[in-house]
Amino acid sequence: MIGALIFPIGLVMIVLSGADLFTSNIMFMTVAFLHRRITIVDLLKNWFISFFGNLAGMLFFMAIVTGYGGVFEPAAYRQETINFATLKAVTPGWHQIFLRGIGANWLVCFAVFISISSREIVSKIIAIWWPTCTFVALGLDHVIANMYFIPIAIWNSHPDISVSFYIWKSLIPTLLGNFLGGGVFVGAIYWYLYLTGAGAVDIDFNIGGLGSAMEAGGPMGRMGSRNQGDSEPQVIEGKVVQQESGGSSGENLDEGHQLPHSGSGMQSGIGKELDATLYAKSKAEKMDEEKAAAGA
């Protein structure tokens, strides 16, 4: 239980730093593909790079940091890595590991999904923590986590696990289960519930209610100084919010990119880049237009 409570810090670090986790990319890329924002080549490229990138990172940490670093040098620690790998890969059947993989990435991707609806750091951490803690406490199988747990047992001379045994008995069933749990039970389901039939989805950062799940973030900068005489105060949810003007240049703020509820003229750099005019069409539609323009 203590390990389950501490384990989510890894996913928190990934989400808050913007790093790539293969198992959460299963959800993201599935939604993007179903909504025709990427091609099948983009999807497979992302999965291939993130999978082997995560594998390389986990093996590096396992061998260099904890292996040669002697983290598990005491006999009790070495034996525990072997016992844990036995519980993960030797004792359960192939189909059981597959089913556990479904549940693990279902919860991991759900944690990432609900963290997207959080508007500040503490809420994101809380949203991530409990679903992730739940999958660890239940003993479910996550393919990226197992890229450390099983190889470290092999490093410590597990008598029943070889590299080929690990690939067949642990990596493959966990990987397939994670695909189903994250891609179908989270990605496809929530795409169907919220995006199917929606067509082009405008990305609008000038939202009015805190109930919205849209994100507002990115590099921010204040544009000019406050000049209360230039514009009427804005009323948001019963509160008067004075907006800033463009300062001495006289340039007004782009309301479509202003951070909601900031109470000032802070703007989102991401909001400017993710303009609806750029992302109103799928990549395939843009490629067709480019080909037509080149042919003309």
Image (cartoon, rainbow, N blue to C red):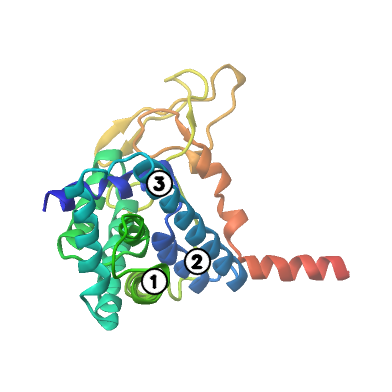
Amino acid type, callout 1: Leu
246 vs 2, nearest the viewer = 2
Badge 3 density bin: few <14, some 14–19, many ≥20, Cα 10 Å: some
Mark nearer the N terminus (1 vs 2): 2
Question: Answer yes or no: do the residues labelled 3 and 2 have beta carbons within 8 Å?
Answer: no
Mark nearer the N terminus (3 vs 2): 2
Amino acid type, callout 3: Phe
- Report which quarter residue 266 is drawn in: top left
For the residues labelled 1 and 2, the Cα–Cα distance comes to 20 Å
Camera-nearest label, 3 or 2: 3
Q: Secondary structure at mark 1?
A: helix
Q: Residue at point 55% right, 30% down?
A: 252
Q: Residue at point 29% right, 70% down?
A: 160
Q: Secondary structure at mark 3?
A: helix
Place of residue 247 in the rendered image (x, y in percent of width and height, measured from the top left):
54, 19
- Report which quarter residue 249 is drawn in: top right
For the residues labelled 1 and 3, the Cα–Cα distance comes to 20 Å
Any mark on residue 175, and which? 1
Place of residue 177 in the rendered image (x, y in percent of width and height, measured from the top left):
34, 75
Badge 2 density bin: few <14, some 14–19, many ≥20, Cα 10 Å: some
Any mark on residue 61, and which? 3
For the residues labelled 3 and 2, the Cα–Cα distance comes to 31 Å
Residue receiving disc 2: 32
